[in-house]
């Protein structure tokens, strides 16, 4: 951000620690499910103050080191307080997520520090914001992906504030937060100047200066908050949450503790329990029901994707839906495929050698299937896998490690993934390619079978909407996180996906929280945590095409280009001896009060 005018004294270690702790804590308090969302607009101000204090009072290589350590400390506080619950599923994974994600967040800060040194205050502020948005964009697109703390996700609990996500996606919220924090910090610095008699902007009495500075300090940030907020509320009032064809849907919420029960009980017992709960609900008005949705990995045994027509567990579900001619059942399963030779696109498939000298490779998937009135069973394999538990990031590049530790891959996930979004159509067919905008309302009713982690990726979800999905189903197993903020955050992020694509969203979650979300992002019906039941509601199959569906994370792509341009300018400045420092927006030396 542009350097704020004001007084810069050498900061003590205690003051820097306090600022890092304050910024990290404010971001945590502003995050869902806590209600203090408004703190987002000032949460980064203490960090900006600390960075400026370091840069104004220190020189040499130690400056960047001090600023980096200060920033890393702030990100550790924010990540630790907000995502500690990951350790409930895996303690090493939780620690790794906090330490490494905090480290990655310092990359945009390093870009900013280099730009401040070479380009000056205003240009470096542009570099910081573009680098941050570029980081968030890339963090959704590599194999170590963990975009849980994308800044724009913080508004997930306040869908009425960000209806314009239908244009920008969550990165628009990130940009909003940075701009407001930058304005607040700059105006606070100006107030300090005028209050100490340093400002020369107004030729007036001290009292007039004070009033004018306070007025400007209040007006600019206030407008930056209010204008997007009022625009969002205007969109909210004009958006019909029931646009489209009504569809009768039932969601099964199971209550199997994944730590102690779900993967320990016999799979047959689990299946019969789910069938029993579903049958009781279907007996009450099941004739009009069109979808019954079961959670992620509802069937715990391994299901051969090449023999879906003859699997015994699936035949039991077919018998369940047989009396209801229009009913489609979407189920999460552990799928696998057999290969007669080593698959090139699935290097983690396991090889099995037989006594007759033949070999077979088997690859596992986290899958969803749809059981329809016909014989065809479309399936989708989860495309975005959780690093560690579900996939070995960059296995092809890192497989040399197996020379030293042959079993290393067995300690990480070995699942395969889908390369396209598969939409389940009501006639039992599947669609894995985009549909022309003017044809979206003409194709058979389609549903997106998003699996767990995928629902936090905005542009990824648009792939389903563009592939004909008029309903979004999210199947998940959030029981790993017990009754922690993690499951509530996961639910809230799905509310943003409803806004971005104007699609009704339904979540079927083991242990909760199963719910229905309308096209404005409001939760209209939800089951309690730990409640085993079928939740029934009406969804609306909308075929509208939003700007975000057309353009995706255009903000992120644009930010990457801007950041690349800024880095080139930094390099040019370094090669030419730092000529950019002579420009008017170059960093100024710290001002000292008049004696």
Image (tube, grey):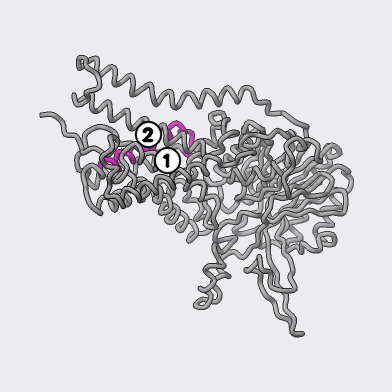
* Front residue of 141 and 238: 141
- The residue shown at (29%, 34%) is 4
Residue 375 lies in magenta, yes or no? Answer: no
Task: Using the image, determine if residue 547 lies above or below residue 448.
Answer: above
Helix, strand or loop: magenta stretch: helix
Q: Which residue is mark 1?
A: 129
Report the side of 481 relative to 449 (left or right). Answer: left
Q: Which quadrant of the figure has residue 439?
A: top right
Report the side of 593 relative to 220 (left or right). Answer: left
- The residue shown at (78%, 42%) is 291
* Front residue of 122 and 135: 122
**Mark number, residue 162:** none
Q: Position of residue 242 (x, y in %)?
A: 71, 28
**Mark number, residue 182:** 2
Q: Position of residue 434 (x, y in %)?
A: 72, 45
Q: Which quadrant of the figure has residue 465?
A: top right
Marks 2 and 1, Cα distance to the nearest angstrom?
10 Å
Give the residues drawn in magenta, as a range: 31-54
Report the side of 143 relative to 362 (left or right). Answer: left
Task: Using the image, determine if residue 201 lies above or below residue 514.
Answer: above
Q: Residues within 10 Å of mark 1 (few under 14, many from 20)?
A: many
């Amino acid at each position: 951000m542009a350097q704020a005018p004001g007084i810069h004294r050498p900061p003590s270690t205690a003051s820097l620690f306090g600022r890092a702790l304050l910024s990290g804590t404010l971001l945590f308090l502003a995050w869902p499910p806590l209600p203090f969302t408004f703190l987002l607009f000032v949460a980064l101000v203490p960090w900006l103050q600390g960075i400026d204090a370091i840069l104004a009072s220190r020189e040499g290589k130690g400056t960047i080191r001090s600023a980096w350590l200060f920033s890393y400390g702030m990100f550790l506080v924010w990540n630790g307080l907000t995502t500690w619950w990951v350790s409930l599923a895996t303690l090493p994974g939780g620690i790794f997520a906090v330490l490494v994600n905090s480290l990655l967040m310092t990359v945009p800060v390093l870009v900013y520090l280099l730009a401040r040194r070479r380009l000056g205050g205003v240009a470096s502020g542009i570099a910081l914001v573009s680098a941050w948005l570029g980081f968030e964009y890339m963090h959704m697109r590599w194999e170590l992906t963990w975009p849980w703390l994308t800044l724009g996700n913080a508004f997930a609990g306040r869908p009425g504030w960000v209806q314009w996500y239908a244009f920008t996606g969550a990165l628009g919220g990130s940009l909003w937060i940075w701009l407001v924090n930058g304005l607040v910090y700059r105006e606070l610095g100006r107030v300090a100047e005028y209050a100490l008699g340093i400002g020369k902007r107004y030729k007036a009495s001290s009292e007039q200066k004070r009033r004018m500075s306070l007025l400007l300090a209040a007006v600019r940030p206030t407008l930056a908050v209010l204008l997007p907020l009022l625009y969002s509320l205007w969109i909210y009032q004009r958006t019909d949450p029931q646009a489209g064809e009504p569809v009768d849907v039932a969601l099964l919420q199971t209550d199997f503790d994944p730590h102690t029960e779900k993967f320990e009980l016999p799979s047959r017992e689990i299946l019969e329990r789910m069938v029993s709960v579903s049958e009781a609900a279907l007996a009450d008005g099941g004739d009009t029901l069109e979808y019954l949705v079961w959670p992620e990995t509802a069937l715990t045994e391994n299901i051969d994707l090449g023999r879906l027509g003859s699997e015994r567990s699936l035949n039991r579900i077919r018998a369940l839906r047989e009396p209801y001619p229009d009913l489609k059942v979407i189920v999460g399963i552990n799928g696998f495929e057999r290969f007669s030779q080593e698959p090139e696109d699935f290097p983690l498939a396991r090889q099995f050698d037989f006594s007759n000298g033949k070999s077979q490779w088997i690859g596992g998937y986290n899958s969803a299937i749809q059981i329809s009135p016909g014989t065809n069973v479309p399936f989708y394999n989860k495309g975005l896998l959780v690093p560690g538990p579900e996939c070995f990031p960059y296995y092809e590049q890192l497989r040399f490690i197996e020379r030293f530790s042959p079993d290393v891959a067995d300690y990480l996930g070995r699942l395969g993934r889908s390369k396209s979004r598969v939409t389940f159509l009501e006639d039992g067919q599947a669609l894995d390619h985009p549909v022309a905008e003017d044809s979206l309302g003409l194709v058979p009713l389609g549903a997106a079978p998003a699996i767990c982690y995928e629902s936090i990726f905005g542009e990824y979800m648009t792939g389903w909407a563009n592939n004909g999905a008029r309903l979004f189903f999210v199947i998940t197993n959030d029981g790993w996180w017990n009754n922690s903020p993690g499951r509530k955050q996961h639910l809230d992020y799905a509310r943003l996906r409803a806004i971005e694509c104007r699609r009704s969203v339904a979540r079927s979650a083991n242990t909760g929280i199963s719910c229905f979300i309308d096209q404005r992002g409001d939760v209209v019906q939800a089951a309690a945590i730990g409640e085993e039941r079928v939740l029934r509601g009406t969804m609306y199959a909308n075929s509208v095409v939003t700007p975000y569906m057309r353009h995706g994370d255009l903000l992120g792509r644009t930010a990457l280009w801007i950041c690349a341009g800024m880095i080139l300018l930094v390099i040019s400045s370094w090669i030419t001896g730092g000529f950019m420092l002579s420009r008017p927006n170059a960093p100024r030396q710290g001002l000292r009060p008049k004696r």
